Amino acid sequence: MTYIHDRCTVINFMKWDKLVLCVSGVLLIISIIIIHTRGFHWGIDFTGGTVIELHSKQPVHLDVIRVNLQQAGLMDIQVQNFDNSHDIIVYSPVKEGNQDIKLRNTIVNIINHSLQENAILKRIEFVGPRVGSELVITGGMSILSALLAIFLYVSVRFTWRLALGTVLALIHDVGITLGFLALGSIEIDLTIIASLLSVIGYSLNDKIVVSDRIRENCRKISVDSAFVITNLSITQTFSRTIITSIITLMMVLILFIFGGAMLHGFSLTMIIGIIVGTISSIYVSSSLALKLGMQTQHMLYQEINTDIEGAP
């Protein structure tokens, strides 16, 4: 598992690169299948409709509210607890014209009747269907734009092989994270999009550190193969990667536990993304670059010597 290189103990990470790539590929395929079959639980930001949040003095029995809503012919209304048993949140699909206002009043009246009290109305939010569809497009475009910008940046700074390996690894991170969200029916809203972009940024930072160390070692010890230098570089940055991931996970876990229901989706996405991104930083991006034919000479720059002749 380890060997000595220039009096340094090096972990042979790339010994397991094929196994890790196969496992990552299987997980990505499973994620795509889950997304295709189950789909996403789109939030009100994307589907359009009305969100009503209420607070009751007594613990809420959701089954009673749902039965009363169904008896009133409101079959497509979603009711669930929000953070605790006293707060409830209601999702209503968008209606045309004044029907939406009437529907909101009807829902509030039914809930008050079910609770046998006048619940405190904490918020009402409405999103039109056109705005929701535009947010789906802009959210997807923001992620694609980020990946394209990353590819161009890493290509210029390092080499296109590392750039392509990095971008594919980031797609791997986002794809598996989305698969977990689809599997758990986590509601996809704007905070999830922000969390996915944060995952890309966090994961990219780790990959840039590893790529920079690979380039540095290629220039210092160009006699060794890219395989050896990659193992050496990952070993040198391994402790930094693990410590950074653990500290970040601790902070995100605190956010998940104490941040309330509004931040559960954001923090859960970050937790999954950090774990997957850490593994891909160690194995996936560098392994893909090696599979694409990365050599030490690709990292070397040629010094250009120019002789300036004086004017006669």
Image (cartoon, helix red, strand yellow):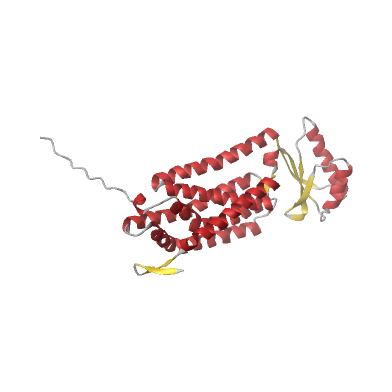
The furthest residue to the right? 71
The furthest residue to the top? 97
Q: Position of residue 46 (x, y in %)?
A: 67, 40
Q: Quadrant of residue 253?
A: bottom right
Q: Position of residue 49 (x, y in %)?
A: 73, 38
Q: Nearer the viewer, residue 252 or 175?
A: 175
The furthest residue to the left? 312
Q: Position of residue 63 (x, y in %)?
A: 84, 52
Q: Position of residue 90 (x, y in %)?
A: 77, 45
- Identify whether 281 is placed above or below 122: below
Q: Nearer the viewer, residue 131 or 6?
A: 6
Res. 117 in view? no
- Identify whether 232 is placed above or below 109: below
Left/right placement of residue 251 relative to residue 132 reads left
Image quadrant in which the C terminus is located: top left
Q: Residue at x 52, y 51 (%)?
A: 169
Q: Residue at x 72, y 54 (%)?
A: 83
Left/right placement of residue 10 relative to residue 202 reads left
Exactly how many numbered labels are in the figure?
A: 0
Res. 290 in view? yes
Left/right placement of residue 71 relative to residue 296 reads right
- Identify whether 114 is placed above or below 225: above
Q: Nearer the viewer, residue 143 or 192?
A: 143
